[in-house]
Image (cartoon, grey):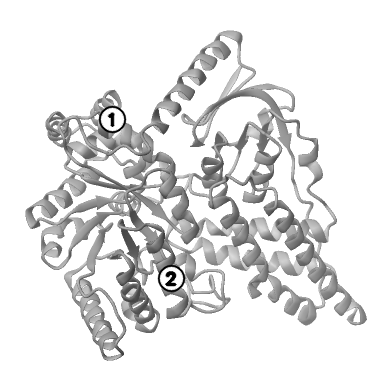
Amino acid sequence: MLALHGTGVSDGIVIGKAFVLQRDLPEIPEYAIPQEYVEEEVTRFQRAVEASRRQLMAIREHIPANAPPEASSFLDAHLLMLDDKMISMAPIDTIRQKQCNAEWSLKAQSDILSAMFEQMDDHYLRNKKIDVNQVVTRILRNLLQQNYDEQEKIAAGAIVVADDLTPADTVMLKHNHVLAFVTSLGGPISHTAILARSLGIPAIVSAHSATRYVRSGEELIVDGKRGMLIIAPDRHIVAEYRKRKKDILLKRRELNRLRTSRAVTRDRRRIMLLANIELPADVRAAAQAGAEGIGLYRTEFLFMNRPAAPNEEEQFRAYVKVVKSMPGKPVTIRTLDLGADKQVDGGRAGAAITVNPALGLRAVRLCLHDTSLFRPQLRAILRASIYGDVRMMIPMLSSQDEIFRVLDLLEETKSELKRSRIKFNPKMLVGGMIEVPAAAISADLFAPYLDFFSIGTNDLIQYTLAIDRVDDAVNYLYDPLHPSVLRLIDITIRAGKKARIPVAMCGEMAGDPRYTSLLLGLGLTEFSMHPVTLLEVKKIVRDSNVRELTRFAKRVLKIRDIREVHTLVEKLS
């Protein structure tokens, strides 16, 4: 028996036989193409792109009718990438200019794009390089005439073990009734991980060397919550996990009964549970989970995989679609959160690369630097505000001056709309994200000028601890329970209470049931998270007594030993 540890990205326990999926590409050769055959090579490349498009469209047809919107949106993102000139046209230019083969031309362009995405500071957007690589790999396989027929051999009920999987693979695994999957690579915020959660496929990613240790046909246990893969378990371990599997199924049935229940604690404290979304189509998943609104609508996805920024009208339509889908409920639209190195077309060759983009011209800094990008978004958000409870949120604030400049721009935009007799809500709420330590420390200075705070723990933790959570070399240091992080959260919540403005949390910590009790004790009353975790958090809220948890939180804040903090919080969760 052997146990491997990875990152659990989709809850559930599965016991079954392994199917090891080998997908190694051969070395990509570079060779010269005689001038008279260059156009034939261009045609060969174009046919490979079209074949890739047909394959993705065919896979899209296999999406279950009751599948969440993520299933189609991720495939649509890959289809859009096939239309992006950086993938569909740039290799053609290289073929013609250098008279080289299509495979080498595409691989060279892929390396350029990967380098650009690698420089991005936002971990979610940086991970989009995985999507680029997956699209490129599909085209390369068609150029090399390697197809994807391995999945036809996978028996229903198998556990797939692979180096990595694409969103398209994940859809086909669901279609073929695969029980679970384990990958050696990948991260918790990759599209494949998100899709696994949405489709209800237990999964583990980043289980290093899994394909080396597992053989096809071997019995496996996949623990999607703990991120544990057990190879060739003995009968006692199998019996233990079968019991745990039954307990999980019972727990899920209980959670489903809470969909229409209110999030109220045992001592009658009302807690708001909201959802984070990225695309208008994601609203359906939020509604199905019983979310009371949208606490974070990421708008940067409107700006990516395209040659130019979306105009005001396109943004307005996207925002209104979400607002109308959540009648009577708040929709918090975060303004553009891209960085200096993230151009609207996903990055251009020759663009300046900063030494440390995480500390560079990004989010509100970029918007204030380039108001031609910002003003159309402000107009679109204001126009959408008459259709419901729209709120605007400013990312990565670090100084009062940034707040003042954004509010001045907003007032100018309101005046323009008034002169044009375009309707908007003049009292639309404007809040700020607390994700930079300076903002948390200065929360009392920011509060008089904002209507609400939202704590973005993903960046707050990274900036506070000076680590990159997706860097394998240092991500072990990423710790939401670090005393410095907890103190900054406490400072922010207390500043909000003193100024009588609501404080929400929209980072991953808000959706992690391990921290719900502690956050309630710290005084958090609004949680915004991925819809998948909402019901589990609601169950904890309904079982909690805030008065008791407040005493617990005060005790935790006084502890100096981080190990003791972990022990106490684990006992409570």
Q: Position of residue 456 (x, y in %)?
A: 30, 54
- Residue 209's image quarter? top right
The residue nearer to you, when weighing 350 against 411, is 411
Q: Position of residue 92 (x, y in %)?
A: 75, 76
Dot 2 alpha-carbon crowd within 10 angstroms: few under 14, some 14 to 19, many 20 or more: some
Task: Give the number of the disc on residue 354.
Answer: 2
- Which quadrant: the C terminus? top left
Task: Give the number of the disc on residue 315.
Answer: none
Tell me the residue at 10%/55% (across/down): 500
Which dot, 2 or 1, sits closer to the camera? 1
- Residue type indicated by callout 2: Thr
Q: How many marks?
A: 2
- Considering the numbered disc 2 on the image, is that residue within a helix, a strand or a loop? loop
Residue 43 shows in this picture: yes
- Considering the numbered disc 1 on the image, is that residue within a helix, a strand or a loop? helix
The residue nearer to you, when weighing 21 against 54, is 54
Dot 1 alpha-carbon crowd within 10 angstroms: few under 14, some 14 to 19, many 20 or more: some
Q: Position of residue 468 (x, y in %)?
A: 41, 51
- Residue type indicated by callout 1: His
- According to the image, label 1 marks what residue? 566
Residue 356 shows in this picture: no
Q: Is 66 above or below relative to 552?
A: below
Q: Position of residue 572 (x, y in %)?
A: 26, 25
Tell me the residue at 22%/30% (across/down): 544
The residue nearer to you, when weighing 240 against 276, is 276
